[in-house]
Structure formats: C-alpha cells, structure tokens
Image (tube, coloured by chain):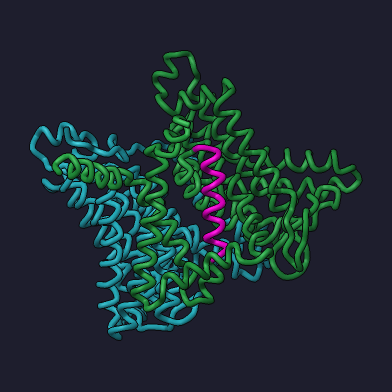
Chain colours: A cyan, B green
Amino acid sequence: MNEWIQAIFNVFTNPTFYKSTLTQSTPLILAALGGVFSETTGVTNIALEGIMLMGAFGGVMGSYFTGNPWYGLVLGTFFGVAMAALHAWASIKYGADQIISGTALILLAQGITGFALVELFGQPGSTDLVRSIPLVDLGAFKQIPFVGDIFGNLSPFVYIAFASVAFGWILIYKTKLGLRMRSVGNNPEAADTLGVNVYNVRYFGVIMSGFFAALGGAYLSIGELGQFTTNMTNGRGFIALAAMIIGNWNPVGAMSASLLFGSATAFNNQLQSQSVLNLSTNTQYIFGMIPYIITLIVVGGLIGKSRSPSADGVPYIKE
Amino acid sequence: MGNWKKYILNEKIIISLLSILISLLVAAIVMLMIGKNPLVAYAALFYGAFGTKEAIIDNLMKTSPLILTGLAVGFGFRAGLFNIGANGQVIIGALLAAYVGTMVASYPFYLSIPLVMVAGMVGGALWAAIAGWLKAYRGAHEVITTIMLNYVAIFIANYVVNGPFQAPGGVPKSPAIAYSAQFPNIMSIGATSLSTIIFVSLAAIVVVYGIIQKTTIGYEVKAVGFNPYAAEYGGISIGKNVMLAMAISGALAGLAGTTQVVGVYGRYFGALGGTMGFDGITIALIGQNDPIGIGLAAFLISSIRTGSNQMQIAGVPKDMVTIIQGIIIFLVATNRIIKTLKLRKRKEAVEL
C-alpha cells in the first residue's frame, strides 16, 4: 500500500505527467470538438476515427512531398474535410443511415491510408520520417521550475486545440450562425419554417467536424513524431466521440472530458515507469480500459446525464 | 416460377448487386490510375480465392466465422439495433470458451463440446446484453455502448492472455483446450485444414432463419424493430425484446469466436477478433439481413479477403479489399443514389 501512495505521489509531483496530459488530450479535444460541430446540427458522425486517420496520413504526405510540414497540415485537413463532405452528402442529400455511412468512411479511411502507404513508401507498416511542425519554444520561461517544464516546449497544436474550443463555444452559443446550428439540430422543421436553410447549416457543421478531427489526426503524425504508422489513431476517434457525449455536446464539456481521458492515459503511462511498484506489464491493460468504462457509466445515466440534440442522427427530408 | 423471378428482381437484391459491381469498378479505376491492369489483378484475386485446394479450404474456413458475425449483426438490424460490437462479443465468447475448454479434459467429447459451445455463446450473449440493458432501461444508444464494450473486451483479453490465462512463448495466447473439446478436421492439405466448424455456421443460418420466420421471439423482435411504439401498443415489451435481441446477436458473435477456439487455433490466440465485427456489418448489409443472403455475402467477402494476398503479389496492395468494402457499405447506406439512378432511367424511358 505504501508503495502505491509513493508511486502516485511521484506521478503527481512530476511535471511530465501534466505535460503528457496536455499532449495526450490535444488530439481528443480537436476531434471531440469536431463531433460537437457535426452533432449540434443533427448529423451523427461516428467516422471521426476515419477522418483523424486521413488527417494523419495527409499530414505526412504533404510534409513528405513539399518538405514543409505546414503544407502537410493543409493537405491533412483537406483530406479530412473531403471525407466529412462525403458523409455530409450521403446523410444530408440522400438521407443515408448516418451510422452506416460513418462505418463506411472508417473502412474507407483504413483502406485508403493502408493502400497509399504501400504505393507511396513501398512497404506496409510505416512511412519514412518527415519533418514535423516545430515546437513552440518559450525561451527563458523554460527556466521556471515545474511550470517551465510543462509549458516551455509544447507543440503549437496544443494551443490551437484550446483556441479552437474557445472559437467553437463562441460560435455555437454567441452567434447567429450558432443559434441556427442548434435549432437545426433540435428541430429542423421549425428552423425550416423560419427560413433557415437546414441543408446548408448541416453541411457546415459536418464539414467543420472534418476540419477539426483532421487537425487532431495530423497532430498524431506531424505534431511530434513526423511519421505515419498503420491505423495510428488506434481508437482515439471513438474516445473523442465518448468525450463529446460526456461533455454533453458542448465544446467546453468535450474539452474537459478529453482532458480527463488524456490524464488517465498519462497517469497510466507514468505509473508503469514507477520502479517502486514494479508493475507487471499487463496491468497497463487494466488502466487502459478506464476511459471506456467511465463512458459506459455516464451514457447509462448512472452518474450525471447527457442529452443529445433532439434531431441528432435523424435525416431531414424537405417536403 | 413467378415467385422465383420476384425474388431475383427484388429491389434490395439489385441494390446489393449493383453496390458490389460499382465498388469493383471503382477499384478497377484506382488500379488503372496506379498503372496496374485490373483484369490481371482480379484474375489473381480469383485464383487466390479458388485456384487451389488450399485456397478453397482457406476460403471456407474464413467464411465460417464471417457467416456467424454477419448473422449476429443482421439479427440486430432486424430488431432495429446496430450492433457494432460483434468484435467484443467474439472476444469474450472465445475467452470463455477457451477457459471452459481447458477444464473439460476428463469429459467425453459429447459433453465437452456442448459445454464449450454454450460457454462461448453465453459469453457473447452476456457481453451484448450489457449494451441491451443500457439501451432498454437506461436509454443509452447501442452504437456508443457496443463500441466502448469492444475496447473493454480487447483490454480484458490482453490482460488475461498476458497474465492469469497465459501460455508461455511468442504470440500472446491462452493454454490449449482439451482434445475432447476440439472439432475434428474433415481433411488436411499441408498446414491447411478444413474443420467441421463450417457445419456449425451452416446450421446457424437455418436456426436463425427459423427463429426469424417461425417463432414468437422472432415475430416480437421484428415487430419492435419495425415500429417499437406500435409493438408496445400491441402488448409486446420493448425493453425485454431489445435485451433479448442483443443477447441473441451476441450469442451468435460469441459462437463465431468459439469456432475459432475449437476448430482453428485450439486455444485463445493473439488478436482473435481481428476485423470480424466490421466484416459482419458489411456482410449483414450486403445480405440485406436475410440469413441466406448473409451466407452468400460472407462467402463473397471471404473470397475477396482470401484472394487479396495473391492480388498483392500481382502488385495491388491488399488494402484495396478494405476500400472495396467501404465503398459497398457506403453505397448500401446511400441506396437512394442507386434508386435515383434507376428512377432517372425510367424517366428517360418514358420520355423516349
């Protein structure tokens, strides 16, 4: 028991844990925000996982061909937006079952990235190393103990993620467009009667979700690593989906839930390296399932209650 | 004769066939773009799936669990439930089957085989019933809960086969199950064996067809799927049937996992679930939730997957198969695209 207290104390007093929480949460925050944009307008998007994967691959591809990781970011987000547009087109114009369309996109993304990986780099598994987006070096600030260790050398993606949440919250709750998005997601018939173009607002929401989820995916590949590996999102799109639900379809809520999940992962990683505990490696799996179990408890309404937009997932067919 | 024609020209079947055809065409265009001859690639794919006895056996052995996950997802669809969690149910079913399988060494086969099969089905059923309960009584959407349960199952499997239920050496795996619990092989060519588990899958098609068409359970589940409010007004309990449908769906997925334990690996082995869950979704959609259609669709998907290695040797990365699957699902989801195409043709015909 004492070793556990010692180990947990060690984790929480080590700045690495806090920095790792931020970096683990960043892709989740961006993708979950994407989910909020789509579902606020009433279109379910379980394809976040696939969109992230395309964003990650596009990032590396752009950086590989131009040598400039920022162009990679542009290409990655373009891929994500294209995927989302496909989902939007199917669900809005053709009233497709949004879960099925999302499933199709996840498979398409896995297939396309795996295929292009072999075609462009000649082997399955992983791409060549490419230039990644440089970290933000805060100079003298790094010297401050603890705080400097956490914030001194972060990826710009971390700042972009938090800025995006602020942007998303203001847009959805403080602007006319946001009001339209919410009305279209809750009562499309009424919105239509009032002259809101339901289809256009939904296209906007879904395409924005592609943009943000792809940003989150690009962080995984060109944020720090500078490489794409097969299926590298590894379920993060689904965790982001869970964060969106636990965060009650609100940008700030989704961010908080993402931080919670990110800290769980960071805690797990740090705990494994505590020599006082001498944990066997398979304990990581016990800790690994925590975010998923939390989600099950929350969606089951056993703690708190989350409520989706009323028309979420329901196609709107104009009479 | 008239009935037969009606069955073949059924709109649903046309949508499935057109979706497959269009996806193969799109894939062919992609192959042309990377400078490969699609005819050569498809010939290689066909040879890889049917060209040799080994290929045919391999193909049938891949078809077998896919029939079961396809039936699992399809049964869920009949009840209006999207069971995206067949993967997790396969894993939990296989784990429980393997666990029981290691304990029945002293029993004769006619006891140990049923025990192991029941264990696997109960494992899958209980795992799915969690999602069923959360849906029926707590209002949680089954898509979200089954996705989460998939990951929990993967972590549980990783934990036990790397710890308490581990066999030493190499790939993470469980100890071998008792000989008396293993299904016999019909024939073996080299390292490839055709196991009798294929009959389990074929029997499942018949049983599921029977449940859907001939039993009260099937009737009530379909009624809830078709119109829950009308069903409830007619005295059918939504909650009970949602849980029951999830449990049956999960039992079928659990059985898929069990067949891998008793007929292929003889133990829980590595990442046994693989892509069976997602494949099950593709198969149920192509098969239009009809047990016989699902059987055929499982054979189709298995053939494409089995042949893809040969296609890769011919220079087309095997991930092309996943792309094809994605396109098929996308087209089935947007079946109104195909219907619109047909409508346009009809209009043109009228104008002409």
Give the residue at x 21% y 47%: A202
Q: Is residue B149 visible?
A: no
What is the x, y in percent for residue A273?
Answer: 59, 70
Q: Is residue A138 left or right of residue B140?
A: left
Question: Which residue reaches farthest left?
Answer: A195
Q: Is residue B292 visible?
A: yes
Q: In this view, does A4 lie to the left or right of A92?
A: right
Q: Main secondary structure of the magenta part?
A: helix
Given residues A3 and B82, the one toward you in this image is B82
Q: Does the magenta stretch include residue A76?
A: no
Q: In this view, does A65 lie to the left or right of A149?
A: left
The span picked out in magenta is B290-307
Res. B253 image quadrant: top right
Q: For the point 14% across and 42% down, which residue is it?
A: B351
Could you tell me which residue is drawn at 86 percent across and 48 percent down?
A: B180
Asked if A231 appears above or below A302 in the picture, the reply is below
Return the x and y of residue A49 as percentages of the image width and height: 40, 58
Say which of B346 and B210 sits in front.
B346
Rendered view: A19 above or below A106: below
User: What residue appears at the point 38 percent right and 51 percent down from the top-left corner?
Assistant: B19
* Labels in figure, total: 0
As drawn, which residue projects farthest toward the bottom? A67
Task: Name the quadrant containing residue A258.
Answer: bottom left
| Residue A282, percent from left and from top | 66, 62
- Among all residues in the image, which is located at the extreme front? B1
| Residue A42 place in picture, x, y as percent | 27, 42
The stretch drawn in magenta includes residue B300: yes
Q: Quadrant of the C terminus of chain B?
A: top left
Note whether A68 is above or below A318 in the view shown: below
The one nearer the camera, A25 or A147, is: A25
